[in-house]
Image (cartoon, rainbow, N blue to C red):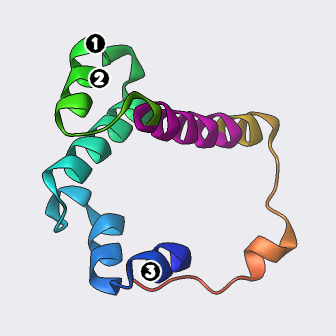
């Protein structure tokens, strides 16, 4: 989340995104993207062509849609792979200070 705070320079937005993106002050396009990413993460079997059309109508190019789908899918893949293999976090990650809500 520290990178997102640096990128947005808006700690309140980051807090809102961390808590519930639906409550965050987002543009309609960003809200549509977050809804798509959530669906891809939690219920990928429900995705259909209409979801891609909605993203295009929100102003996203096909390359942008591909990119955030690839990033979302990659994170899901890596996390599931690590969980499935019982991979423990490296000590470095355990030693980082935990973010406060």
Q: Which residues are magenta?
A: 64-79
Task: Out of 59 and 100, give the one closest to the viewer.
Answer: 59
Q: Which residue is mark 2?
A: 52
Q: CA distance from mark 1 to mark 2?
A: 5 Å
Q: Tell whether 17 sits left or right of 64.
A: left
Identify the residue at horizontal 45%, vertical 86% (top origin). Answer: 100
Residue 80, compared with residue 49, is above or below; it is below
Q: Left of 72 or right of it: where is 83? A: right
Quadrant holding the C terminus = bottom left
Mark 3, residues whose alpha carbon is within 10 Å: few (<14), some, or many (≥20)?
some
Query: Which residue is denoted by mark 1 in the rendering?
Result: 49
75 over 12 or under it: above or below: above
Marks 3/2 in contact by CB < 8 Å: the verdict is: no
Identify the mark nearer the N-term, 3 or 2.
3
Q: CA distance from mark 3 to mark 1?
A: 33 Å
Q: How far across and down, in percent of the image, does residue 5 sit?
A: 44, 80
In the rendered image, residue 89, in percent from the top left (x then y), is placed at 79, 61
Whether the magenta-drawn stretch holds residue 28 is answered as: no
Q: Which mark is residue 90?
A: none
State if disc 2 and disc 1 touch (CB < 8 Å): yes
Count of numbered marks = 3
Q: Residues within 10 Å of mark 1 (few under 14, many from 20)?
A: few
Q: Which residue is mark 3?
A: 5
Q: Is residue 100 above or below residue 37?
A: below
Residue depicted at 35% across the width and 74% down the height: 14
Give the distance between the C-alpha atoms of the residues marked 3 and 2, in whole angstroms: 28 Å
Q: Which quadrant of the figure has residue 88?
A: bottom right
């Amino acid at each position: 989340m520290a990178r997102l705070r640096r990128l947005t320079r808006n700690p309140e937005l980051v807090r809102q995104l961390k808590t519930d993106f639906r409550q965050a002050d987002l543009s309609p396009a960003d809200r549509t993207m977050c809804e798509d990413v959530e669906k891809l993460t939690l219920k990928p079997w429900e995705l259909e062509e209409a979801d891609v059309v909605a993203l295009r109508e929100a102003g996203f190019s096909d390359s942008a849609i591909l990119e955030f789908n690839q990033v979302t899918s990659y994170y899901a893949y890596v996390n599931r792979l690590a969980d499935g293999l019982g991979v423990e976090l490296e000590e470095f990650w355990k030693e980082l200070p935990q973010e406060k809500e």
